[in-house]
Image (cartoon, helix red, strand yellow):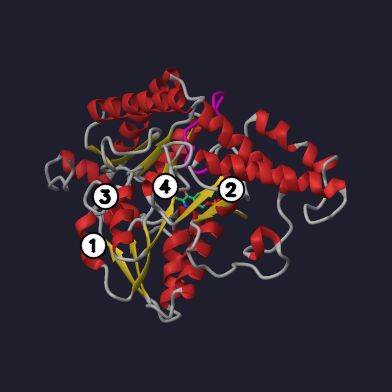
Amino acid sequence: MTAERQIYLDNAATTAVLPEVVQAMLPYFTQEYGNPSSLYELGQRARSAISDARERIAAHIGARGQDIYFTSGGTEADNWALKETAFAYRDKGKHIITTSTEHHAISHSCEWLEKRGFEVTYLPVDTDGLVSPAGFEAAIRDDTTLASIIFANNEIGTIQPVRELAAIARARGVVFHTDAVQAIGHVAIDVEELGVDLLAASGHKFHGPKGVGFLYIRKGIKTRSFLDGGAQERKRRASTENVPSIIGMAKALDIAMANFDARVAHETALRDRLIERVLNEVEHVRLNGHRDQRLGGNANFSFEFVEGESLLLSLEQKGILGSSGSACASGSLDPSHVLLAIGLPHEIAHGSLRLTIGEETTVEDIDYTVEAIKQVVGQLRQMSPLYEDFVAGKKPLSAVR
Ligand SMILES: *Cc1c(COP(=O)(O)O)cnc(C)c1O
């Protein structure tokens, strides 16, 4: 069933490519199609276009152009940062520190490294999803070479104290990577001020194209090349550059940074309206993630006595597109590792809903969504035997805040 109205509240999953971004990309498919490695002018024009894109992207995060390496997306940048850096420092040690709330691009890379003789410490988080800097410091050993801590969580939106964590890592000689895929364009980032050594980003989370991202690598940090082949990306990442997408990603970041303050303020105001209304107007619900130290557009709720997948489907019938807290994409019904890491019991994690707001979201969209949630949650609870038992006083309420 398709609803008349579509309210896209899944901007953490991906975003629409802006028309200006498409316009900037188009010539590089048809007229300016040269290979940047070719010596004739058609190739050199493409080369200078990506070099210009690199400089602009670098400037947005306080980096030098030569320290930006284009990749096929956030996943590749994270894999590169983890695997190749771990191996580059293997003679020094085999211990890596990360958190229990990373994106799978990091956590599965860590598991890959564990199978190859590395040891990984997964730092716990508190009920808001924050890692403790003191806990991080205590986990550092003499053989720790690398730490990877997600900047802003893709599910619950919690923003980590990256600057403090990176300073601890630096003082102890540990290379510090951050997965900033959700943060870039939404949180001000300056790699010098933050003191991070490696930083991963992806174009499609800030209205750029899918299949393009970058890894920032601080000068002097050792990392092996991720792809072997030609001499592209200063011999560190072979393969002909994805010229149109690189141009598009740079354009998207230019736009994101040009209207940064107004956009973030708009998204944050709508997020706060959504959170306040849901918490005040729906019973037996909790907000997941830190109340304030969170992404401007992120709201994540757990509704007791409701199954997340059913909630999503019912909302979709009303035109609202969001995301649930279980890893349904992988065909598994396991609740998200992030929701379990913040201490939610399985049955509550199952009733989770993530709504991520974008610049185009309006107050009317939020109010319509709140009314829809109230209606759908009410209907689903009416059909829930657990809710029936609860109302009849048979089952004590689980720990809902
Ligand atoms: C989306 C996302 C990724 C993966 O980026 P892709 O470009 O889709 O490969 C990695 N980390 C986080 C936090 C993300 O949100």
Residue 65: mark in rendering:
2
Mark in front: 1 vs 2 = 2
Mark in front: 1 vs 4 = 4
Residue 81 location in percent, x, y? 49, 62
Q: Amino acid at mark 1?
A: Glu
Structural distance between the alpha carbons of marks 1 and 2: 31 Å
Q: Can you name the residue that lies furthest to the top here?
A: 364
Structural distance between the alpha carbons of marks 3 and 4: 23 Å
Q: Which badge, 3 or 1, is on the more N-terminal residue?
A: 3
Q: Badge 3 is on which residue? A: 130
Q: Nearer the viewer, residue 313 or 367?
A: 367
Residue 192: mark in rendering:
4
Q: Residue at x 73, y 66 (%)?
A: 230
Residue 291 location in percent, x, y? 26, 36
- Name the element at disc 4: helix
Q: Residues within 10 Å of mark 3 (few under 14, many from 20)?
A: many
Q: Which badge, 1 or 4, is on the more N-terminal residue?
A: 1
Q: Residues within 10 Å of mark 2 (few under 14, many from 20)?
A: some
Q: Nearer the viewer, residue 326 or 53?
A: 53
Q: Is residue 84 above or below residue 391?
A: below
Q: Residue at x 71, y 69 (%)?
A: 229
Mark in front: 3 vs 1 = 1
The image quarter in which residue 39 lies: bottom right
Q: Is residue 387 above or below residue 96?
A: above
Is 78 contained in the magenta span?
Answer: no
Mark 1–mark 4 CB contact (< 8 Å): no
